[in-house]
Image (spheres, coloured by chain):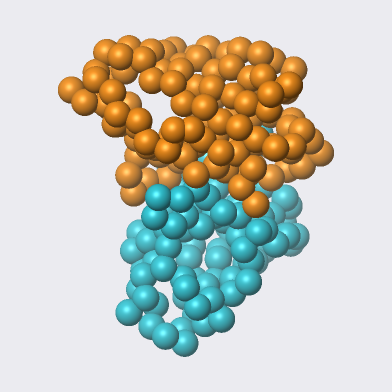
Amino acid sequence: DGGITQSPKYLFRKEGQNVTLSCEQNLNHDAMYWYRQDPGQGLRLIYYSQIVNDFQKGDIAEGYSVSREKKESFPLTVTSAQKNPTAFYLCASADEKLFFGSGTQLSVL
Amino acid sequence: SQQGEEDPQALSIQEGENATMNCSYKTSINNLQWYRQNSGRGLVHLILIRSNEREKHSGRLRVTLDTSKKSSSLLITASRAADTASYFCATVGAGSYQLTFGKGTKLSVIP
């Protein structure tokens, strides 16, 4: 998956719980992205970061938070405010094109 | 917002046939990209075509871009069972860093 590592592959969230999805890249890319994919659907942008210590909301940021303290890392927290978190989450880094991780499937217990 | 819309939503062909998928978009773009996704996996970049280009080739892939019609097509020639996957177009708007994805075309190649 081109130097992007996402973990865990599967994650289960209890009601009222915050969970954090990990994304690490060794491609030396400045830009990183988080997308959400629902079954049979395209990708929707949650957050993106063009540079360390800076990030912007995408189309569906409500109920999610991110940090970008290091160039290599862009973790995504799914908060308890996200009422429908069950989805496939994809992280990517980019030069002009996107390099994706293998994804995290998040489900609600 | 999903700018790209692929057509058809699903396509089933016999091995050896050609597969054509189309993508339409709404606003001016810097470039358009095609990605492939195998079930349960991340997306893999296939090809990028810039707004001033009309056609690009990569192996068995041929991409065209018509900016006047705001559309693109992806042709896979001599398809193989291993080409079975979902294919997405993504656009980068003029002056933007974001890629906006369509909902994809699910291609099934029957051996």
Which image quadrant is residue B50 in? top right
Chain that appears orange:
B
Q: For the view shown, which residue lies furthest in the bottom direction?
A: A16
**Residue projecting furthest to the right:** B95
**Which color is chain A depicted in?**
cyan
* Vertical comparison of A18 with B102: above or below: below
Q: Position of residue B41 (x, y in %)?
A: 37, 46
B19 relative to B102 in the view: left or right: left
Image location (x, y in percent) of residue A74:
59, 59
Residue at 42% of width from left, 38% of height from top?
A: B9
Q: Position of residue B12 (x, y in %)?
A: 29, 29
Q: How many marks?
A: 0
Q: Using the rendered image of the protein, determine whether residue B44 is visible from the camera's viewpoint.
A: no
Front residue (pair A1, A39): A39
Query: Vertically, is A24 above or below B43?
Result: below
The image shows residue A39 at horizontal and vertical percentages of 39, 55
Quadrant containing the C terminus of chain B is: top left
Locate residue B53 relative to residue B59 in the image: left or right. right
Identify which residue is drawn at 38% across, 61% down: A105
Instruction: Work out whether residue A10 or residue B53 is closer to the camera in this orientation and state it.
Output: B53
Q: Residue at x 74, y 30 (%)?
A: B30
